[in-house]
Image (cartoon, rainbow, N blue to C red):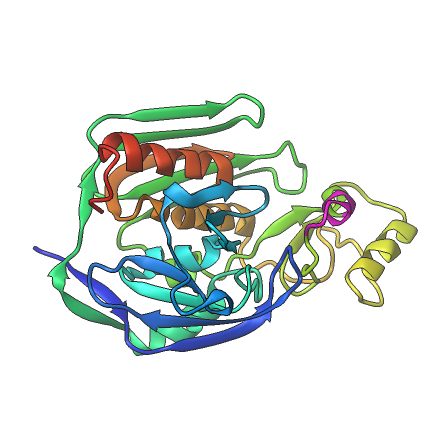
């Protein structure tokens, strides 16, 4: 049965701050003609400041994925791209008036809540697929991340995360075509370890972080004065560590919310191949660097260095 490309039915507007830049940004999701693919438009740089959502333009992967083409830069793109991948959006324009996609609540849920009631617009052009022809295996010795991709009849992911954390333990998640992305994965928020917060802040990151858009894992009990210092960082009056090992800023939406969020990141980063592909992905402790390295490899090596997709 032939599948056809899909786009959005209408425009959707969002406003918020970038997780790392802290800058306020207005963003609109717009329908696009068939065979457009996914493109970003930096409206603050001009009406033609487009950058295609493909791995060619990945330049940074620290705590998020960044694309750059000349003076056009967009960062923390993985959540909106995962939304489009999970829902099956082939063509759309993401217009924003600053350099970073707004973090909103740290998940894809706000996008899903806006788009899902309207459904998608089916277009007349057939959907483009690439079928993986040979296995790929990559291991990052420094981080311990692994990705193995093998040919398959449909796209699927198995993910394991293990950060030697007593709080998280070893978490597993899986996804296959037909699973309910909107319910099972989109609500899952980004996360960070408490001991990383000060380092990230000192290095100019998480300027837009707050207690509403991230899970904070507190591995060991810490003195209240440290918690108070973090409360000052997030501009809140008081924070405590829950018995489960998280800051009391949010309640878990799933027991394994963290690994579900990392799987969502994989979907967003892999969409940078530029088209959908059939393969089984086995991932261990994946991150944006290894995800986008694989996306580049599939795009250039297996697609012959072309942009057919």
Camera-side residue of 255 and 55: 55
**Residue 109, image x and y in percent?**
48, 66
Q: Main secondary structure of the magenta part?
A: helix
- The residue segment tinted magenta is 198-205
**Residue 277, image x and y in percent?**
24, 43
Can you say which quadrant of the picture contains the N terminus? bottom left
**Residue 224, image x and y in percent?**
90, 52
Camera-side residue of 304 and 121: 304
Camera-side residue of 94 and 128: 94
Relative to residue 38, is residue 144 depicted above or below? above
**Residue 247, image x and y in percent?**
73, 55
Give the quadrant of residue 169.
top right
Residue at the limit of the structure toward the right, as seen here? 225
Say whether residue 287 is visible. Answer: no
Give the quadrant of residue 51.
bottom left
Residue in the picture at 65% in, 58% down: 21
Relative to residue 232, is residue 282 depicted above or below? above
Give the quadrant of residue 124.
bottom left
164 vs 73, left or right, is right
Say whether residue 252 is visible. Answer: yes
Residue at the limit of the structure toward the left, as seen here? 1
């Amino acid at each position: 049965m032939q599948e056809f490309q899909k786009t959005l039915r209408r425009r959707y507007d969002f406003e918020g701050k970038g997780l790392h830049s802290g800058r306020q940004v207005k963003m609109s999701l717009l329908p696009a003609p068939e065979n457009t693919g996914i493109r970003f438009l930096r409206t603050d740089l001009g009406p033609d400041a487009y950058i295609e959502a493909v791995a060619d333009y990945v330049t940074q992967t620290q705590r998020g994925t960044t694309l750059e083409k000349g003076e056009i830069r967009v960062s923390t793109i993985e959540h909106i791209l995962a939304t489009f991948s999970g829902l099956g959006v082939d063509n759309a324009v993401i217009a924003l008036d600053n350099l970073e996609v707004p973090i909103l609540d740290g998940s894809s849920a706000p996008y899903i809540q806006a788009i899902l009631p309207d459904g998608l617009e089916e277009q007349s052009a057939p959907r483009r697929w690439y079928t993986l022809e040979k296995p790929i295996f990559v291991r990052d010795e420094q981080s311990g991340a692994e990705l193995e991709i093998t040919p398959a009849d449909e796209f699927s992911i198995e993910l394991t995360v293990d950060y030697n954390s007593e709080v998280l333990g070893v978490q597993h998640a899986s996804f296959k075509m037909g699973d309910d992305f909107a319910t099972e994965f989109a609500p899952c928020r980004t996360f960070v370890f408490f001991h990383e917060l000060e380092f990230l802040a000192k290095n100019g990151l998480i300027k837009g972080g707050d207690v509403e858009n991230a899970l904070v894992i507190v591995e060991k009990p810490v003195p209240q004065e440290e918690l108070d210092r973090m409360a000052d960082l997030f501009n809140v009056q008081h924070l405590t560590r829950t018995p489960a090992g998280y800051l009391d800023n949010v309640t878990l939406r799933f027991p394994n919310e963290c690994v579900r969020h990392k799987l969502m990141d994989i979907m967003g980063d892999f969409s940078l191949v530029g088209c959908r592909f059939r393969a089984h992905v086995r991932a261990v402790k994946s991150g944006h660097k290894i995800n986008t390295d694989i996306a580049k490899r599939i795009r250039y090596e297996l697609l012959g260095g072309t942009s057919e997709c």
